């Protein structure tokens, strides 16, 4: 199976792009969802999170994502610490999954917001970057309704600059237009890789 990482900053339109690829027949994984699941079920990771961010990040053995986010997304040091705990476990999971499906026909697309920061790009055959101007990304993130603007800006500041990502991606989709523009760009990319 051909493996393609789909990355981009907060509000870039990764999730919308992934929906288009799924409709066109891609097998899809979302690294954030896998990481959240690992935070619920991996005993070693749970212990490290409690040690680093407090026992109350879990209540009755259930992860309290709001509490963890409030403590992890305050400084680059705390954010880096969280990533250092999660990334090795997530990398092991992705490596096993990709290895197990390598001989299966088709295309696997994995949405990974902090692909470059985690150093995961070597796991994939190709990296697709979805990017957009900062104002548009803020608008998208606010429309999703999960974060306040100050939280959006703080998280953006913790991510790798877009220009650096552009220099490292194999293919770039600029998402500064309409939803239909993004769909068309995704379809064009899909046809390109299918050849």
Image: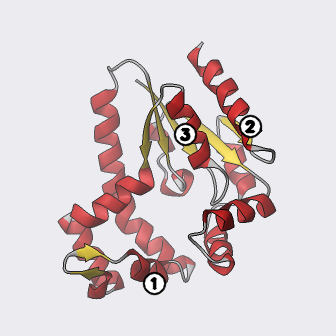
Q: Residues within 10 Å of mark 2 (few under 14, many from 20)?
A: few
Please give left or right for residue 24 compared with residue 82 in the image: right
Q: Give whichever of 131, 13 is nearer the camera.
A: 13
- Residue 55 lies left or right of residue 29; in this view the side is left
Picture coordinates of residue 57, whole percent (x, y): 32, 82
Tell me the distance, in whole angstroms, between the alpha carbons under discs 2 and 3: 13 Å
Q: Position of residue 49 (x, y in %)?
A: 31, 76
Quarter occupied by residue 134: bottom right
Please name the residue that numbered disc 3 is placed on: 19
Q: What element does badge 1 sit on?
A: helix
Q: Which residue is mark 2?
A: 180
Circle 2/circle 1 CB separation < 8 Å: no
Q: Which of the labelled discs sits on residue 71, or is there none?
A: 1
Quarter of the C terminus within the rendering: top right
Identify the residue shown where x is 55% and y is 40%: 18
* Circle 2 or circle 1, nearest the eye: 2
Describe the element under mark 3 as helix, strand or loop: helix
Callout in the foreground (1, 3): 3
Q: CA distance from mark 2 to mark 1?
A: 38 Å
Kind of element beneath mark 2: helix
Asked if residue 7 can be seen in this view, the reply is: no
Q: Is residue 94 left or right of residue 141?
A: left
Dot 2 or dot 3, earlier in sequence? 3
Q: Is residue 11 above or below residue 50?
A: above
CB within 8 Å, label 2 to label 3: no
Q: Position of residue 9 (x, y in %)?
A: 64, 57
Question: Which quadrant is home to the N terminus?
Answer: top left
Position of residue 187 measured from the top left corner of the image (x, y, whole percent): 66, 27
In the image, residue 79 above or below residue 122 = below
């Amino acid at each position: 199976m051909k493996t393609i990482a789909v990355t981009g900053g907060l509000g870039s339109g990764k999730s919308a792009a992934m929906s288009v690829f799924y409709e066109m027949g891609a097998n899809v994984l979302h690294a954030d969802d896998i990481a959240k699941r690992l935070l619920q079920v991996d005993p070693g990771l749970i212990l490290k999170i409690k040690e680093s961010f407090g026992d109350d990040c879990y209540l009755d053995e259930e992860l309290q994502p709001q509490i963890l986010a409030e403590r992890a997304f305050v400084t680059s040091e705390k954010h880096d610490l969280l990533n250092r705990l999660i990334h090795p476990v997530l990398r092991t999971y992705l490596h096993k999954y990709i290895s197990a499906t390598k001989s299966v026909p088709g295309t696997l697309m994995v949405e990974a917001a902090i692909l470059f920061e985690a150093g995961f790009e070597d796991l994939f055959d190709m990296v697709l970057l979805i990017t957009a101007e900062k104002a548009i990304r803020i608008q998208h993130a606010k429309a999703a309704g999960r974060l306040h603007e100050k939280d959006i800006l703080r998280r953006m500041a913790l991510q790798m600059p877009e220009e650096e990502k552009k220099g490292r991606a194999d293919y770039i989709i600029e998402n500064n237009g309409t939803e239909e523009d993004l769909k068309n760009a995704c379809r064009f990319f899909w046809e390109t890789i299918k050849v």
